[in-house]
Image (cartoon, grey):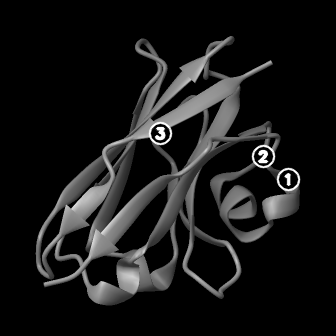
Amino acid sequence: QLQLVESGGGLVQPGGTLKLSCAAHGSTLNYYAMGWFRQAPGKEREGVSCIRGNDENTYYVDSMKGRFTISRDNAKNMTYLQMNNLKPEDTAVYYCAAGVGVAPMSLCRFAGVVDYWGQGTQVTVSS
């Protein structure tokens, strides 16, 4: 059983930066693709960025490319999402997710393949 705990959310002004962290407990991450999803009020949960289990193969939703960077440190069982140039439309609850043996694009595009979810962390972009 894998437990995921997000941190790093908060209130930031437009154009600001935040770095989200996801700590995994209960298993090593080598065999899991990891990803970040978000859900804004009144909207469906959507994939943001995902990364393969044992290498740096990544996938980004087009609207996040160039602003968000996903990374992982399997030795520390951590996954990160660096978010730059934040916009009000980035306001959402951000969730960490893990999927066994799936490609990053599949994890991000098909929430049904997610095996584990974190509890979420709120990101609010507002002046």
Q: Residue furthest right?
A: 112
Q: Amino acid at mark 2?
A: Val
Q: Which residue is mark 1?
A: 113
The quadrant where residue 73 appears: top left
For residue 9, side relative to residue 36 (left or right):
left
Residue at the spot 29% in from the left edge and 87% down from the top edge:
88
- In the rendered image, residue 7, in percent from the top left (x then y), is placed at 38, 39
Residue at the spot 79% in from the left edge and 49% down from the top edge:
114
Vertical order, 119 against 110 (above or below): above
Q: Quick check: marks 1 and 3 in contact, CB under 8 Å?
A: no
Q: Which residue is mark 2?
A: 102
Count of numbered circles in the view: 3
Q: Amino acid at mark 3?
A: Glu
Residue at the spot 31% in from the left edge and 44% down from the top edge:
8
Numbered circle sitting on residue 6: 3
> Callout 1 environment at 10 Å: few (<14), some (14 to 19), or many (20+)?
some
Q: Secondary structure at mark 1?
A: helix
Mark 3 or mark 2: whose residue is earlier in sequence: 3
Mark 1 or mark 3: whose residue is earlier in sequence: 3
For residue 112, side relative to residue 111 (left or right):
right
| Cα–Cα gap, marks 3 and 2 | 21 Å
Residue at the spot 71% in from the left edge and 81% down from the top edge:
44
User: Quarter of the image containing the C terminus?
Assistant: bottom left
